[in-house]
Image (cartoon, rainbow, N blue to C red):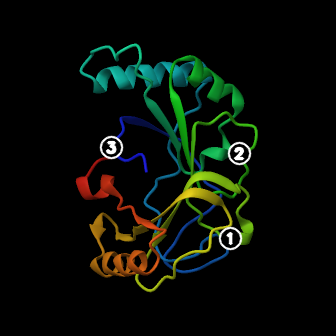
């Protein structure tokens, strides 16, 4: 729902799930995860804030952001809920950032001061622990049914599965059919893959 807003993605290493095309004990199946989980480095909250400021300044060509502009930091992963805590959120808020998180929902975010929560479940609905969000987002391959979310959210989105970085035309056509039959859902293509942005 926030597509097109200036955002800096802060990617956390590690995940408690492993998504794969085939269903398994840690995957509902249907798509392969495209995230590399092993690299990364340990950072303090102060180092994270400094990195965010430097990266945004570099992205702006060295220009300062307007004082009234509060850019979004998107906490993503892996699974950010394994590492994000209130102290980090407070440090980023104090630096003038708004915080969004993209989580698989398997860990409750209760007590974290977040401005936007996206839950993209990768487990069966009974295993979802984050029960309230701004949006829920599901990746759907050809033939997968519309989900019945355990997480209550204002916005419900489905994304066609990709084959690596290539669009899967059958998944796209299937998702179009799903939203025609379920008008309370919106199509949310993975724009970064379409545009080749990492």
The residue indicated by pointer 1 is 125
Report the side of 63 relative to 146 (left or right). Answer: left
User: Measured from the top left, where is residue 41 in percent x and y?
Assistant: 54, 34
Sequence-earlier tag: 2 or 3: 3
Q: Is residue 39 left or right of residue 55?
A: right
- What residue do we see at 60% from left, 45% from top? 80
Q: Is residue 141 left or right of 78 when viewed as pictured?
A: left
- Which label was assigned to residue 4? 3
* Residue at the disc numbered 2: 109
Circle 1: is it few (<14), some (14-19), or many (20+) Cα within 10 Å?
Answer: some
Whichever of labels 1 and 3 marks the residue nearer the N terminus, that label is 3
Instruction: Judge by depth and name the residue closer to the eye, 98 or 60.
Output: 98
Marks 2, 3: nearer the viewer:
3
- Residue 95 vertical placement versus 192 (above, below): above
Q: Residues within 10 Å of mark 3 (few under 14, many from 20)?
A: few
Q: Secondary structure at mark 2?
A: loop
Mark nearer the N terminus (2 vs 1): 2
For discs 1 and 3, the disc positioned in front in the rendered view: 3
Where does the image place residue 131, in percent across and percent down from the top left?
71, 57
Is residue 104 visible in the rendered structure shown here?
no
In terms of depth relative to the viewer, which is nearer, 132 or 170? 132
Q: CA distance from mark 1 to mark 3?
A: 29 Å
Asked which secondary structure carries label 1, the reply is helix
Please report the residue visible at 42 percent of the width from the left and 45 percent of the height from the top: 2
Q: Give coordinates of residue 163: x percent, y percent.
A: 34, 71
Horizontal arrangement in the rendering, residue 91 relative to residue 112 (left or right): left
Q: CA distance from mark 2 to mark 3?
A: 25 Å
């Amino acid at each position: 729902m926030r597509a097109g807003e200036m955002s800096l993605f802060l990617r956390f290493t590690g995940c408690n799930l492993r998504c794969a095309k085939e269903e398994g004990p840690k995957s509902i199946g249907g798509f392969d995860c495209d995230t590399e989980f092993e690299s990364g480095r340990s950072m303090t909250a102060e180092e994270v804030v400094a990195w965010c400021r430097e990266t945004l300044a570099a992205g702006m060509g060295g220009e300062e952001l307007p004082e009234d502009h509060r850019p979004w930091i998107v906490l993503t992963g892996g699974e950010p809920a394994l590492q994000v805590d209130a102290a980090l959120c407070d440090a980023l808020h104090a630096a003038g950032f708004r915080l969004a998180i993209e989580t698989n929902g398997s860990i409750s975010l209760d007590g974290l001061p977040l401005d936007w929560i996206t839950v993209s479940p990768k487990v069966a609905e009974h295993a979802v622990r984050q029960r309230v969000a701004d949006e829920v987002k599901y990746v759907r391959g050809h033939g997968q049914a519309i989900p019945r979310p355990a997480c209550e959210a204002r916005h419900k989105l489905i994304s066609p599965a990709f084959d690596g970085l290539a669009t899967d035309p059958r998944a796209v056509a299937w998702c179009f059919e799903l939203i025609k039959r379920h008008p309370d859902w919106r199509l949310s293509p993975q724009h970064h893959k379409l545009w080749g942005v990492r």
